Amino acid sequence: MDCLPRGRPSLAAFFGRLSDRLSRGRESSARRSSWLLLAPLLTSAVPQLTLPTNCLSPEGTHIFQWIRNLVPEFGIAGSHIKVLSSPAEFYELMKGQAKMAKQRIVLASLYLGTGSLEQELVDCIEIALESSLKGCGSPNFRVSILLDFTRGSRGQKNSRTMLLPLLRRFPDKSQLK
């Protein structure tokens, strides 16, 4: 059973291509064709996507097979997924992961933030770096943080100023990109 919508959009595309072929060789100002005006009339205003119930089941996942050629695939059991319900829960999880890190901490985000939750996360990263210096962790322990420069630099107090003490104290073990 096919789970993808069919019908009028392909007809509109056909008329668009036909219009392009018929108008080749004309001046650019005269290239507009009345065929293109028909395209909105041939498609519904709001595309209706009606999926059979099996499209969301494992048997219906075949429609996503093309994605394997474009991006890496990471298989994971649904029982290993936990939906977080609040920013506080997210930061608690991040802090716990930072405390347990043995070799590296890698963060990528548009910005870090400047609130108490973010400061607690930076403090946990600092504790992890201190532990590695004391020999409790790997001597090769590293922290890499990738932030958007523009977003991370907004305002007097920003993501970069939040991380600056960490970067100054551990210049060989931390980097901000």
Image (cartoon, helix red, strand yellow):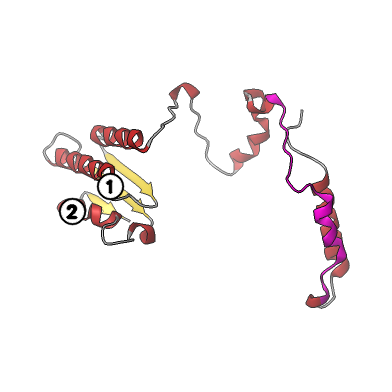
> In the rendering, which numbered label is found on residue 78?
none
Name the residue located 62 percent from the left edge and 24 percent from the top edge. Answer: 58
Name the residue located 32 percent from the left edge and 33 percent from the top edge. Answer: 93
Q: Position of residue 177 (x, y in %)?
A: 33, 56
Viewer-side residue, 116 vs 30: 116
- Residue indicated by mark 2: 165
Q: CA distance from mark 2 to mark 1?
A: 16 Å
- Residue indicated by mark 1: 115
Name the residue furthest top. 79
Name the residue located 13 percent from the left edge and 42 percent from the top edge. Answer: 133
Viewer-side residue, 175 vs 48: 48
Query: What range of the chain is rendered magenta?
Result: 30-53
Element type at mark 1: loop
Confirm whether the magenta stretch covers residue 35.
Answer: yes
Callout 2 crowding tier (Cα within 10 Å): few <14, some 14–19, many ≥20: few
Instruction: Report which quarter residue 130 is drawn in.
Output: top left
Task: State which tag comes first along the sequence, 2 or 1.
Answer: 1
